[in-house]
Image (spheres, rainbow, N blue to C red):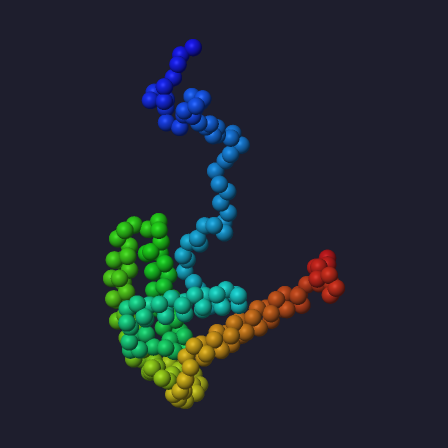
Amino acid sequence: MTDHTPETDPPGTDPTTGEGPELDEPDVFDGPPHVSDADVPETPHPVNWNLLSAHDLETEWLALNRWVDWLRHTYGLPASVLPPFWHHHPELLWELSALHLHWLGAYDREQNASAAIGWHRDFADARARLRDWVAASGTRIDRDRPTRQTTWPGEEPGPPVEDVVIADRDAEFVQFVQAQVRRRQEAEDEFYASLDDDLDVDPVTGEVRD
């Protein structure tokens, strides 16, 4: 039997018994951690505002509004580039939505390191377009009016364009989104009701009968 000395023992050895530390043996049943779809961030994708469901429409409006608010504060954008009532103007909505999606893609963790400077280069182009849209629409810091539409031959002239003073932008935005979602929900309900008219649906169970 060979004597041991503390000086020759490996790290973690009990000096009184000379026994080494217990090692955790791998469990053959241990597998990689389970990752669900909920744990993986959704890949940014184009948003077609014309085709969103009522639920998705509300979600996208709120997400875009948060990002636009961050954008204007971060870059100190004036109302001539980003007015408070941008949500009333489809041309501004589509431009800002595209810019937002571009930003999400550029700052995705899987993106290459030069993507951010590419976004800023495109952001400069977008600011020039935003100035044009804002100047054409006539929206201002404290009031808004619908973007003027050109009447083509044979069309009925549109209603007169009048300025509307809006005192509380955030409150008005909430009301605007609620109205948009309500109209989209009504359109969905009407569509599904038309499908039910073509099918023999049990009024009690909701099942489609042959």
Can I make out residue 121 in this image? yes
Q: Residue furthest front?
A: 16
Q: Residue furthest top?
A: 1
Q: Quadrant of the N terminus?
A: top left
Image point (40%, 87%), residue name? 165
Image point (28%, 76%), residue name? 78
Give the image location of residue 199, x and y in percent.
Answer: 68, 63
Q: Quadrant of the C terminus?
A: bottom right
For residue 156, side relative to residue 99 (left or right): right
Give the image location of residue 46, x and y in percent.
Answer: 41, 60
Can I make out residue 51 in this image? no
- Report which quarter residue 79 is drawn in: bottom left
Q: Is residue 26 above or below residue 47?
A: above
Image point (60%, 71%), residue name? 190
Nearest the eye: 65 or 12: 12
Q: Is residue 114 above or below residue 197?
A: above
Nearest the eye: 196 or 21: 21
Give the image location of residue 154, x and y in percent.
Answer: 42, 84
Tally of numbered discs: 0
- Report which quarter residue 126 is drawn in: bottom left
Image point (42%, 21%), residue name? 18
Give the image location of residue 113, x and y in percent.
Answer: 27, 51
